[in-house]
Structures are given as structure tokens and as C-alpha cells.
Amino acid sequence: MAVSAMNEKDQISAKDAAYIMQGGRCIYCGRVVSHTKATCEHLTPRSYGGKRTYGNVRMACRQCNQARGNGSWLVFWMMMQAARYHGIIQHG
């Protein structure tokens, strides 16, 4: 499938692809997440016009997905990496 808007059935495939690509780990905290508890993370939030495309979907744990909200994924990722480095978060 080309990188274009996906329907609901295809989004499941994008989640599967992201899960496999990331080795079952959250893009932000690195925690291993079961496939059933993994969430589709939209790098460009849907609230800002982000599409359900393979290039825009990654896998995140529910806690990180909710904590990020619709802010910048890159800023949130950098904050999580700093927290992991300084031992503020222990998982991952």
C-alpha cells in the first residue's frame, strides 16, 4: 500500500508493522509492551491533520501516548531519553 490515508482495517496493519519494526518496545520509554496493550502513536497528531499513514504511525505504551498528548513527538522523545539517562524512569 502506498503511503496514503488508511482505513480502519489498514490501521491495524500499520500497528502490526510498527510493533514488529520497534521490537515490541514503546518509541518513547523503551518499555516492552504486549501487542494488545500497545497503542498507535501518530507522530503528527490527528488533531493537527496527521493522517493514518505508515510513515506517521508508531507504537507507544498507553502511558507515554497519553502523556505526550498532541505536543511535539520529538520534544517528548528527547525528554524521555533524558529521563532514562538520569534514571528518573527505570523501565525500558
Image (cartoon, grey):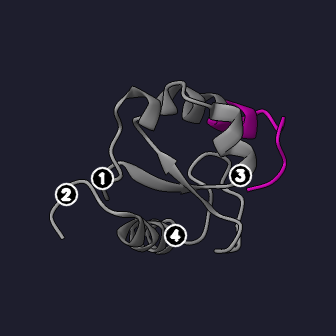
Q: Residues within 10 Å of mark 4 (few under 14, many from 20)?
A: many
Residue 6 lies left or right of residue 8; in this view the side is left
- Residue annotated with mark 3: 62
Q: Which sits in the foreground, 22 or 67? A: 67
Q: CA distance from mark 4 to mark 2?
A: 18 Å
Q: Quadrant of residue 38?
A: bottom right
Q: CA distance from mark 1 to mark 2?
A: 7 Å
Q: Earlier in the sequence, mark 1 or mark 4?
A: 4
For residue 3, the mark is 2
> Marks 2 and 4: in contact by CB < 8 Å?
no
Q: Earlier in the sequence, mark 1 or mark 2?
A: 2
Q: Quadrant of residue 53?
A: bottom left
Q: CA distance from mark 1 to mark 4?
A: 13 Å
> Marks 4 and 1: in contact by CB < 8 Å?
no
For residue 55, the mark is 1
Q: Earlier in the sequence, mark 1 or mark 3?
A: 1
What residue lies at 60% left-to-right and 70% top-to-bottom?
Answer: 24
Magenta stretch? 80-92
Look at label 2 and name its amino acid.
Val
Q: Residues within 10 Å of mark 3 (few under 14, many from 20)?
A: some
Q: CA distance from mark 4 to mark 3?
A: 14 Å
Look at label 4 and name its amino acid.
Tyr
Q: CA distance from mark 1 to mark 3?
A: 20 Å
Q: Residue 73, percent across and down?
A: 50, 33
Query: From this viewpoint, which residue is outermost toward the left?
Result: 2
Secondary structure under tag 3 reads helix
Residue 11 lies left or right of residue 28; in this view the side is left
Q: Residues within 10 Å of mark 2 (few under 14, many from 20)?
A: few
Q: Quadrant of the C terminus?
A: bottom right
Look at label 3 and name its amino acid.
Arg
Q: Residues within 10 Å of mark 1 (few under 14, many from 20)?
A: some
Q: Is residue 45 visible?
A: no
